[in-house]
Amino acid sequence: MLEIFFLTSSLAKFDHIQYLLKDYDVLLRPQPDYGKAYEEPRILDREELLRKSVNDANVRLARTNRLVAQKKKLFDPTTPQAGEGIEELFRLASDNQEKIFIIEDTSVKIDALSKDTEFPGLDVKYWMMSNSFQDVDRQLIENGNDRRATVRSDLVIYLPPHYRGPDSSEYEVFTGISAGSIATEEFFVQTNPFYPWLDNKTFNKWFVPEGEDVPLSLLPIEVADTYDFRLKAVERLIEYLETRLNLKLKKRSRARTPFQVGMFDNPSLVVCGPTCAGKTVLAAHLARIYGYYHVEASDFMHLAFRRKHGDAVSIDIHKFALEALKIDPEIVSRQVISHLEGLAEVPVIITGFRSPHEMPVLVKSARDFRFIFIEADIQIRFQRSLRRSREDVVPDFQKFSSRDAIQDQMGLSLVKKLEVFHVQKNEDTLRRYFREFSRSQKLSAYGKLPHRNLSYQKFKGASLTLQSAILLALLFDMRIEHRYLTTTEIAKLVNANLRIARVFGGKEIITDKNNVSRYFNQKVSPFFEVKLGKIRRYRLSSTGVSHARHTAQTVLNALAPQLS
């Protein structure tokens, strides 16, 4: 699989290109740093803009000692060549930068307003911010009401030295253009929850493709695809990669490989059931006693939502989930299976699936799952909900019942009827519930993931990534109180307790709150829940708790030879 980094700050644009590459063996990854990927100059010369963007991206990505040393020399005011080595810096960056990356620029040409040059051209994003539909409509009428317009996508791919031939350029540009017109009336447009590039912010809300009567943002996805300017650029990119670089990128079916059981005998489990049936409490028990890694499916639905919409509050997550499962029933199960690929030696319990259409990916996966449906009388479940007093508790029985109705809409009532599912009741005490479950599944204690007796001192001398430090700090803090923390509080927590562990090249690393903020701003993860407000706060999700324990065990295993 070819790995390509897409350098963009737009979640919608990233999701769009990822969607267009879904039929190819290409792993599209976000920028590998937490800062700005590149400085995009606000200039109207397309070739110059793309050249400067690629050069700046290379300088930021080429993090080699040689480049850092050369950069200091090139821009040291005491040296004769100070300020004159910018092209040499770009050349060094290109020679030291090994990642394939793409950038994309969208531009618009409105015929009636393009006198000496295309307008608004590359400045379309800023032009949209300062013009309403009424403003544009008036300008068009004043200029003869020629409403023709074209939208252009320029997709740039940077090729590292080992991919270039003798006559290859450092980067190649692929262009897609769609023709149409600006709508004659303003349409009411809401951002498509599943295809966020069909939105109410960009030129797509006014652009009516040739042969259509409504703007691109209002077209069904199968119709919108036929006019997709970025799709045309992506198709040319794929053709180039396959012919010029001799790559075969069209996805082919893969044979299922048997799952290799690690150092445990316990089965991996998929546990479904209605609210308060006992799924999460069972997962916590199995994690504590039998070393299970708990994956909560809803964490990955939130991940899909945030990848498309960020922290948007205008789109309801429940409506998004309903729509997502209709359009792409395996949107969560695919992510979960992908996440589990790095956990071959750990027994897994997955909770939170609600649709029978999510199951085929799990049934066909290399991991041999057992499928359990937990059920309990609705009155018993309602009383449990009141007792546990979570933030999302519903004190009214009718409203609680409506949750069951929503889950049935998703298909939960059909899940337990699937042949692969074994139904188990949970209407007695927790002790009996756990005992009966353990006996029915013939579980044996293993304790792979650490839960008790963890201390910061055990991690002394460890080399932790920022993500690992955040996970561990929140895991330890959670043992006291499962609270939401600001990025400033998280940074203080890391520095107070894990400072001795965060080392690189023999030096301690102080965790700056700005680095933590950039991490959460740039990296969307299933490991954290976010609480929106004036200041955003974070805590570990259910999946995050298990991953933090897994991280702790991995670090401790790495330290074991040093401690022996």
Image (cartoon, rainbow, N blue to C red):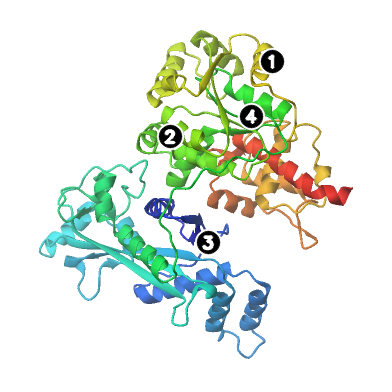
Answer with mark 2 or mark 4, whichever residue precedes in sequence: 4
Q: Which residue is mark 4?
A: 267
Answer with mark 1 or mark 2, whichever residue precedes in sequence: 2
Q: Nearer the viewer, mark 1 or mark 2?
A: 1
- Secondary element under disc 1, as helix, strand or loop, is helix
Residue 85: give x, y in percent of width and height.
56, 84
Residues at badges 1 and 3 in contact (C-beta under 8 Å)? no
| Disc number for residue 458 | none
Q: In the figure, is residue 516 to the left or right of 558?
A: left
Q: Which residue is mark 2?
A: 317
Q: Nearer the viewer, residue 468 or 238?
A: 238
Residues at badges 4 and 3 in contact (C-beta under 8 Å)? no
Q: CA distance from mark 2 to mark 3?
A: 28 Å
For badge 1, the amino acid type reads Arg
Q: In the figure, is residue 152 to the left or right of 487?
A: left
Q: Which residue is mark 3?
A: 36
Q: Residue 171 is drawn in which quadrant?
A: bottom left
Answer with mark 4 or mark 3, whichever residue precedes in sequence: 3
Q: Residue 291 is drawn in which quadrant?
A: top right
For badge 3, the amino acid type reads Lys
Q: Nearer the viewer, residue 370 or 281?
A: 370
Q: CA distance from mark 4 to mark 3?
A: 44 Å
Q: Which residue is mark 1?
A: 435
For badge 2, the amino acid type reads Ile
Q: CA distance from mark 2 to mark 4?
A: 32 Å
